[in-house]
């Protein structure tokens, strides 16, 4: 299921009820991240969500989301976040894809730049 830019902005403004995960590669973070986002590269997903809570935190520096917590994923244009959404959905997580990703967010936030 997708989430719009306006819906994401509402979640960010409320500051609760979700976790926003940027699934881009490390070097892409130089172009900025959407406010409140944490980073977990898509290529790490498979092993990451099999870790116990403590190991997950030690490795990624944020708490492993519970399956009931809303997870919102994004990337540069929405493709990789679609893969992440499918992966998490198959693991039983409550997840939505922000398909607008950096491409759309960069239109409303000067701290996030579109690239590529």
Image (tube, grey):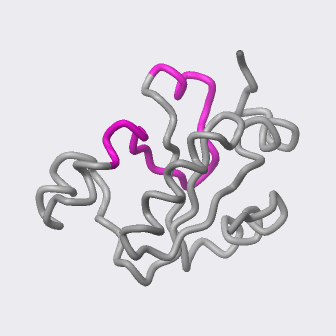
Residue 11 placement, left or right of 50: right
Q: Is residue 99 above or below residue 89?
A: above
Q: Is residue 22 magenta?
A: no
Residue found 76% across the figure and 70% down from its top:
10
Residue found 38% across the figure and 78% down from its top:
67
Q: Is residue 29 above or below residue 36?
A: above
Residue found 81% across the figure and 57% down from its top:
5
Residue 105 placement, left or right of 29: right
Most foreground residue, 111 or 26:
26
**Picture coordinates of residue 18, whole percent (x, y):** 54, 72
**Picture coordinates of residue 62, whole percent (x, y):** 31, 57
Name which quarter of the figure residue 88 lies in: bottom left
**Picture coordinates of residue 45, whole percent (x, y):** 34, 48
Most foreground residue, 94 or 34:
94
Residue found 45% across the figure and 79% down from its top:
69
State the count of labels. 0
Q: Which range of residues does the magenta coloring cover? A: 27-45
């Amino acid at each position: 299921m997708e989430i719009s830019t306006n819906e994401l902005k509402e979640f960010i403004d409320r500051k609760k009820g979700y976790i926003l995960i940027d699934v881009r590669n490390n070097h892409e973070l130089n172009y900025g991240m959407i406010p409140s986002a944490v980073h977990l590269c898509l290529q790490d997903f498979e092993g990451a969500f099999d870790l116990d809570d403590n190991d997950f935190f030690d490795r990624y520096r944020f708490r492993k989301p519970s399956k009931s917590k809303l997870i919102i994923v994004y990337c540069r244009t929405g493709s990789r976040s679609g893969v992440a959404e499918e992966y998490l959905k198959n693991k039983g997580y409550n997840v939505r894809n922000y398909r607008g990703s950096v491409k759309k967010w960069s239109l409303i936030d000067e701290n996030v730049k579109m690239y590529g």
